[in-house]
Image: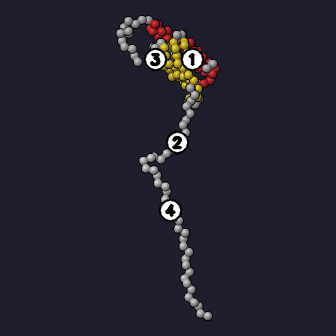
């Protein structure tokens, strides 16, 4: 028997993957970035208090700084009226929230705080100066 020449065995071809083009990005528009979760703002309790004829605004945040709460006082009217805990009419104060709870809430706490500090000689002098008519102070422009 004679051997017949056989056709050369074909080598198996590697599978070629065609690259699929990505969809075109719209021009002129920025890609939307994933938004970071917004931190929840601390709860704010807003109250007003009339203490000895002075109208005060109280803003209290019981959970603002970890273990500490934040209390703000502002004199609303009469403008420039002295209160014993501040000379400027504004006070920012950090304290433990359980002090406010024990006092009965932010208004009760502020009332007790002001009553306690009103016995100081410095506050009494400031109150006397504010009540006294000032001839030369009336000529000056009011501070803002």
Q: Secondary structure at mark 3?
A: loop
Do the CB atoms of the residues marked 2 and 3 lie less than 8 Å apart?
Answer: no
The residue beneath circle 1 is: 110
Is 19 situated above or below 125?
below
Q: Quick one: SS at disc 4?
A: loop
Q: What residue did someone put label 4 on?
A: 19
The secondary element bearing badge 2 is classed as loop
Q: Give the number of marks.
A: 4
Spatial CA distance of label 2 from label 4 is 32 Å
Disc 1: CA contacts within 10 A as few (<14), some (14-19) or many (>=20): many
What's the distance in space between the residues labelled 2 and 3, CA to CA? Answer: 41 Å
The quadrant of the picture occupied by the C terminus is top left
At horizontal 56% and vertical 22% (from top left) the residue drawn is 46
Q: Return the disc, 2 or 4, that comes first in the chain's sequence.
A: 4
- Most foreground residue, 35 or 66: 35
Above or below residue 128? Residue 87 is below
Looking at the image, tell me whether mark 1 or mark 4 is earlier in sequence order: 4
Pointer 2: residues within 10 angstroms few (<14), some, or many (20+)?
Answer: few
Q: Which residue is mark 2?
A: 35
Residue shown at 59% from the left, 20% from the top:
106
């Amino acid at each position: 028997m004679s051997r017949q020449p056989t056709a050369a065995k074909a080598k198996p071809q590697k599978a070629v993957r065609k690259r699929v083009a990505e969809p075109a990005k719209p021009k002129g528009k920025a890609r939307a970035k994933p938004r970071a979760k917004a931190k929840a703002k601390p709860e704010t309790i807003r109250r007003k208090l009339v203490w000895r004829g002075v109208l005060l605004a109280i803003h209290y945040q019981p959970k603002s700084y970890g273990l500490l709460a934040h209390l703000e006082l502002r004199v609303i009217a009469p403008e420039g009226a002295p209160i014993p805990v501040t000379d400027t009419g504004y006070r920012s104060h950090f304290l433990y929230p359980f002090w406010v709870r024990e006092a009965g809430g932010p208004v009760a706490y502020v009332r007790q705080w002001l009553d306690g500090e009103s016995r100081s000689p410095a506050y009494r002098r400031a109150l006397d100066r504010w009540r006294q008519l000032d001839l030369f102070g009336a000529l000056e422009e009011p501070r803002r």
